[in-house]
Every structure is written in C-alpha cells, then in structure tokens.
Image: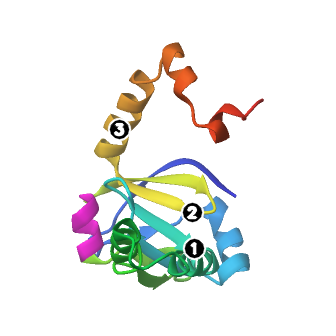
Amino acid sequence: MFRGVSAINLDEKGRMAIPTKYRPELQDCCEGQLVVTIGFDKCLLLFPLPAFEQFEHKLMKLPMLDSRVKQVKRLVIGHAAECEMDSQGRFLLPELLRQFAGLEKRVALVGQGTVFEIWNDEAWNQSRDAWHEGVSLEDLGDLSPELGSLTF
C-alpha cells in the first residue's frame, strides 16, 4: 500500500529514486517493472506493472465509441511508458511526460494506495492548499454516496 508524500530530487538525466520504504514492495509485486503515464490532474501516475495492466484491461472493456473513454485511453494508454527500477531504486521519467507535468528538480511522490502520483513540488503544494481551503462543512452535504458512506 502506497501512502504519504515524499519530496524527491530528479537528477540531471531526469531519473528519480523510489523511497527506500517502497522498494521491497515494488520488487515483490512487479520486480521493479513500472509504468508511468499522464494523470488526470497536471501530474503523472506511476503504477507497478501488474496494477497498470489490470487498469488497462478494465479500460479496454469500456465502449470505444464513448468520446470520454477515447480521451482517457489516449491520455493514459497513449502516454504510458514502461520503466524499470535499477539497483539503486531509480528509473528514468521520459522527457515528454516530465514536460507535461512541469517536473524539474523537486517533485512530490504522492501515494494513492496502489498507485503513485508524481507532481511538480510547487504545483503539489498549491493544489493541496487550494483543496484544503475549498473544503467546508457545507460541502459535506454534497458528497457522493460512496464518500458519504465512509466512516472512521
């Protein structure tokens, strides 16, 4: 399970290192085989290969004539790049994807359960602050049924 935010520096080649605490799990579940692609916000998604293949399989079952499905396929599958962690836990982020997400030196790796988001550090901080400021008690009445059913 991937959770939490990690601040990471990209090296001059555009490589990033997976935090040490996640490396054993990524070795166990996918032998360091990863897929990085465009996210739904101005970020990238980083999947262990098996998790991406499950998501891709579900996506491919959706009706191809639905314009929103085509858009998601074009973004997620069309920009997917397979990567492999090296012995130091690093992998290369393709330049096209780094440009899309505005990734330069500092990035935020955000755990989302079975997947990571990779954000420009400054964009992550601004988005997080905006989301936090945008939440009020009045908004709680507008929750989707799925979120409304969550309890502690």
| Quadrant in which the N terminus is drawn | bottom right
Q: Which mark is residue 127?
A: 3
Residue 101 is a magenta residue: yes
What is the three-letter code of the residue carrying label 3?
Ser
Identify which residue, 145 or 127, lies in the foreground: 145
Q: Are marks 2 and 3 in contact (CB under 8 Å)?
A: no
Foreground pick, 133 / 144: 144
Q: Quadrant of residue 61?
A: bottom right
Residue highlighted by disc 1 = 55
Crowding near the residue tagged with mark 1, few <14, some 14–19, many ≥20 C-alpha atoms within 10 Å: some
Q: How is the image coloured?
A: rainbow
Estimate the x, y position of residue 81 in percent, counting from the top left.
Answer: 40, 82
Secondary structure of residue under mark 1: helix
Which residue ends up furthest to the right in the rendered image?
A: 152
User: Which region of the structure is painted magenta?
Assistant: 96-102
How far apart are the two marked residues, 2 and 1, measured between alpha carbons? 11 Å
Q: Secondary structure at mark 2?
A: loop
Task: Point out the tag, 2 or 3, that comes first from the N-terminus.
Answer: 2
Q: Toward the viewer: 55 or 106?
A: 55
**In the depicted structure, whether residue 149 falls above or below residue 115:** above
Percent of width and height locating residue 114? 63, 62
Q: Is residue 85 visible?
A: no
Counting other residues with Cα less than 10 Å from the Cα at mark 2, is it few (<14), some (14-19), or many (20 or more)? some
Q: Position of residue 53 (x, y in %)?
A: 58, 81
150 in magenta:
no
Cα distance in 3D space between marks 2 and 3: 19 Å
Q: How many marks?
A: 3
Task: Give the mark, 1 or 3, whose residue is nearer the N terminus.
Answer: 1
- Residue indicated by mark 2: 115
- Mark 2: amino acid: Val
Left-right relation of 99 to 125: left
